[in-house]
Image (spheres, rainbow, N blue to C red):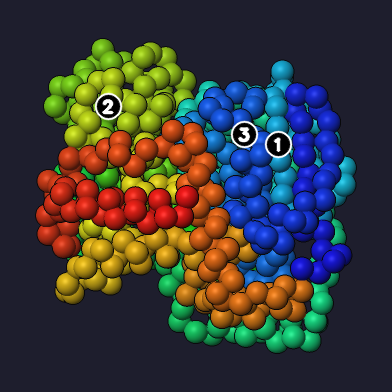
Amino acid sequence: MHPNDPLYRVLYIDLTKKIYWIEDRRELFENYLGGAGVAINLLKEECPRGADPLRPENPIVFAVGPFTGLYPIASKTVAMFKSPLTGNLGESHAGGRSAIAIRMAGYGAIVIKGASKHPVYVAVHGDKVFFRDARALWGIKSSITVARIIREKEPGAGQRAIMRIGRAGENLVKYACVVTETYRHFGRLGLGAVFGSKKLKAFVVSGKRSLPVLDKRRYREIYKELFDTMVKSPLMKKYHDLGTAANVIPLNKIGALPTKNLKESKFENADKISGEYLAEKYLGRRLACAHCPVACIHLAALREPYETEPYFYKTTFISYDYELIYSLGSMLGIRNAEDMLKVLDEVEVLGLDGISSGVVLAWATEAYEKGIINENDTLGLRFKWGDYETYIKALRYIVEQPNEFYKALANGVDYAASKYGGEKFALAFGKNEMPGYHTGYLGYFGFLVGSRHSHLDMGGYSIDQKALGKEYNLDELVVKALREEEWRQILSSLVVCFFARGIYKPEIVAKALEPLGWNLTPEDLGKIGAKIHRLKYEFKFREGFDLDSLRLPHRIFETPTPHGYLDEYKFKEMIEKFKLLIQKQI
């Protein structure tokens, strides 16, 4: 690590006392690189055992890594906190300008503690921190409007990040997100609710530092090698052309696209909400996170005529990707792109996590079909597959929580099903709503035991697809999935976008660290990754996570996957194998 790299500086902000200070935490970065590795250590230090996730004692940790600002696609910030949705590890990654802004402000991590008595937003401009009164921003209907107001008041245009919550975060919906810039999100596990519990409406950061490099010639050589691989080889092309929406048709073709609350795994209207269709009919712009040459963010331009003015139109840019198309499209049986885009836009305005929102609404629709809930519960709404107008009204009710039913939905599908019934088709894993991959054993195994219950933890959905037509050796695949998650700890400590995981292999990572002043071998990196994963699991166990208590929704056994019907007994075997591996580490 370069001795003058400001990465080791950690900014602490206390919202209760309205004070801040900076500490030299060089030892953390030297041992854990940055990002997730440093964040889990800071979370363990700052979050008391058994802390209520929505009380002041739950800290928020933002962390970046040694590649941030220096190598391409090292564009993500890691947020870590105790999740109000799952009650254990909360970890969410977002791009936009957040990572570069934190690094250029001169920090490797930022810890936000305590809670304000009244709404505030915090602005960090280099070494100065400002606590701004946000009472006038609290309650504004759209998260987009909040950002527009703040950007007029704060300096640093073009270099700053503006992270903020919508009404969902203010009202403590447990899957509220934090929106950063426009169209990027700390989406999963309820960071927005933690912001809301602290009366923290927004967090702004900017800076103009330079970053030191030990061997500039070698750095330029490796940078060029990485950059050329990204832009001249086909490895990243699909993300630029269609984005992750390219997955819709292939997953539908193999019967892995969850549809209508996973009652089906193929959607008859998949072609009307596919990446190809959206690109042809609606694509308005592509955007990139800061320091990314790929530009995977796809914006649809939705053009709606004014009712009383001929030839006048309102045009709204709406971000879409595979996960949103799955959760707010096929899972809800929405048959055309325009209706789906309107639901996506409402989720953005309210500041909700799109995946959780869609899974919650899909459960409510099936529960209504089966008579588990009725119109007294839904305040007159008649949930029906494909009825986007009802879904938009329901999203607003979830945020406002006018009765016990919508309060239950605001707590997530696992909680709602525990109160009303319908657990068999409540699609949550470790209390987190499922991602969009009905691919087979490894996909679901990753949702269950991944440290943040995300498809991105182990990439099991990808392993499932590569195993098609081959013999499944589940014992071997459990080990492979665990090793993959351990390696991903390195990527999320550097912090590299997982889309570039096929480029940032252990050898090139070790090589790229050298001109920055690090001397680590691929074997060293492997050990650090395993250590970070162990720390995450220690935190989960400390907060009550129990592998023996995991619930498998019965629905996943009722609908065939590309590997056929799944066997519950095999999952139990896989979990036992995983337990032995974890017990050896802890």
Look at 22% across and 39% down and name the residue there. Answer: 553
Is the Cβ of the residue at disc 1 closer than 8 Å to that at disc 3?
no
Q: Secondary structure at mark 2?
A: helix
Q: Which residue is mark 3?
A: 47
Q: Is residue 80 left or right of residue 380?
A: right
Instruction: Name above or below for residue 338 compared with residue 394.
Output: below
Q: CA distance from mark 1 to mark 3?
A: 11 Å
Q: Is residue 110 visible?
A: yes
Look at 70% across and 32% down and name the residue there. Answer: 113
Q: Is residue 269 left or right of residue 527?
A: left
Q: Within 10 Å of the Cα at label 2, are there few (<14), some (14-19), or many (20+) other Cα atoms?
A: many
Q: Is residue 271 visible?
A: no
Q: CA distance from mark 2 to mark 3?
A: 29 Å
**What's under tag 1, amino acid-wise?**
Ile
Q: Which residue is mark 2?
A: 417
**What's under tag 2, amino acid-wise?**
Ala
Q: Secondary structure at mark 3?
A: loop
Q: Which residue is mark 1?
A: 112
The image quarter in which residue 413 lies: top left
Instruction: Name above or below for residue 470 compared with residue 193.
Output: below
Precedes in sequence: disc 2 or disc 3: 3
